[in-house]
Image (cartoon, helix red, strand yellow):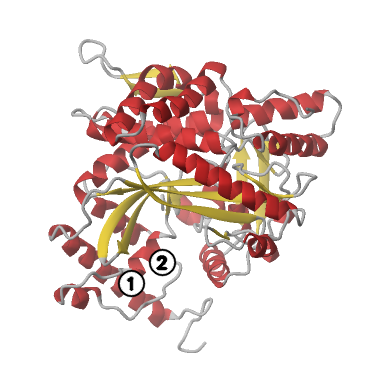
Amino acid sequence: MGEKVVAAGFDLSDRQRHRGKLRQCLEGLSRLLEDSRFDRPRNLMGLEIELNLAGPDGAPRMMNAEVLERIASRDFQTELGQFNLEVNVVPHRLRGRVLDRLAEELGTGLGYADRRAREIGAGIVMIGILPTLAADDLVLGNLSDVDRYMRLNDEMVAARGENFTIDIDGVERLTCAFRSIAPESACTSVQLHLQVTPGRFAAVWNAAQAIAAAQIAVGANSPFLFGRELWRESRPPLFVQSTDTRPPELKAQGVRPRTWFGERWITDAFDLFEENVRYFPPLLPICGDQDPMRVLDAGGVPSLQELVLHNGTVYRWNRPVYAVAGGVPHLRVENRVLPAGPTVVDVIANTAFYYGLVRALADEPRPVWTRLPFAVAADNFEAACRHGIDATLRWPRRSRGVGAGITAVPAVQLVREELLPLAAAGLDAWGVEPADRDRYLKVIEERCRRRVNGASWQAATYHDALTSGLERDAALAATTRRYCELARTGEPVHTWPVGAEG
């Protein structure tokens, strides 16, 4: 059979060498943490948004290369599917008028990009999953022509050894199979980064995990996939299944999926990086020339290239990030929970809610994760994905006396009565301008008061279109066109009138 077994350009020696380099990277990270080499606190946040391209008919447009050429801005980059883009906002300090500045920058950049894209029939849509996507759109030929995507696809397909099965049972049930990772491109998200010191990392990550369900409850925006109404936020189950490299036998053995919520609260940033190496085989065993230990011994800062690459192929909803900027290492928590959209105002409202709430909960003397079992937090996340704004969550009672414990509470009540005041206090602790704080948290409050978010609006408008006599596909297209029309007004989704006709 030959001495080399080659898969997508990698052979056995590549994998053995890469595994050794990963161990060296972990040792290097451990030394950096012990030696307190990390950047000082700077309250830096970052924002990335994945986007869809759709034509005037609401259908996806497979032309991100042409759109990027027209936009001609380094802020915009390719994403996995040819109907995807990503926009990156430069890091900002969490203070003062940061929320309004973010809104202005995003509004200007996305408005310009949308105008340029529409010149060639491919407008930009911020939405979790484009309702008009069909299974036939998500094929290997519609992945972006980027080598790393093709390599990743080849490795994941080889690891799985059979088709990727999608089976989501929600309002309706969807079952289908794919021969590539293309369905992953249906999921477009907002990624919120927060730079933290090693000493604060565990508290911030635990807080982010605890509130993931509340984020989804108020921000759900992905109720449809391939013409079926599924969960109010269908991205998580789709992402889990479209990246699942486990054949059924490994799944039955309890092997963890590459997209996962986690299984425990942590005490140190190292925990997550070490788990990623221990539990997940590398998909891209690419080795650099740098020896991390030699760099450290010489007083330098290693890039930990192999660990960083591997970490990017384990899809935690709150991902640990190691990076080096200006010769100084830093750690970030990357929050990947939220879907994109519907509008810039909605995105900034979700951003304010997250950063404020994480700060407040991480600062608490008796943290919520000491009172909330991790398994309950995971169950909350699934409940929020299934039911969105109508979810019921389990949360620690505020009372510390008789009757203290976990209670079930409607998500909208929990957010309005407990989490929004905490988010406001957290934004105050960051030094955010009170007027900005109030403006954007008011959007979250109004969603809860009216029980409206992107997912509920899409579902109500779709059913209104069905009632008017449209067939399923026509109703989804009409819903998408109306969504795009209202999104371009910039008004937050809780103010949108239900109905596919203006």
* Vertical arrangement, residue 491 with respect to residue 151, above or below: above
| Residue at point 38%, 60% (across, down) | 311
Quadrant of the snapshot with the C terminus: top right
Quarter of the image holding residue 438?
Answer: top left
Q: Secondary structure at mark 1?
A: helix
> Observer-nearest residue: 189 or 260?
189
Q: Indicate left or right for 96 with 7 as reference.
A: left
| Above/below status of 232 relative to 160 | above
Q: Position of residue 434 (x, y in %)?
A: 36, 27
Q: Residue at x 79, y 34 (%)?
A: 475
Q: Earlier in the sequence, mark 1 or mark 2?
A: 1
* Residue 106 in sight: yes
Residue sitting at the far top: 402
Disc number for residue 224: none
* Residue 19: mark in rendering: 1
| Residue 186 visible, this orientation | no
Q: CA distance from mark 1 to mark 2?
A: 8 Å
Q: Residue 263's image quarter?
A: top left
Image location (x, y in percent) of residue 107: 56, 43
Determine whether, in the image, residue 426 is placed left or right of residue 91: left
Q: Position of residue 250 (x, y in %)?
A: 46, 56
Q: Label 1 sits on what residue type?
A: Arg
Q: Please, which residue is most extreme toward the right here?
A: 469
| Residue of label 2 | 282
The total number of labels drawn is 2
Q: Amino acid at mark 2?
A: Pro
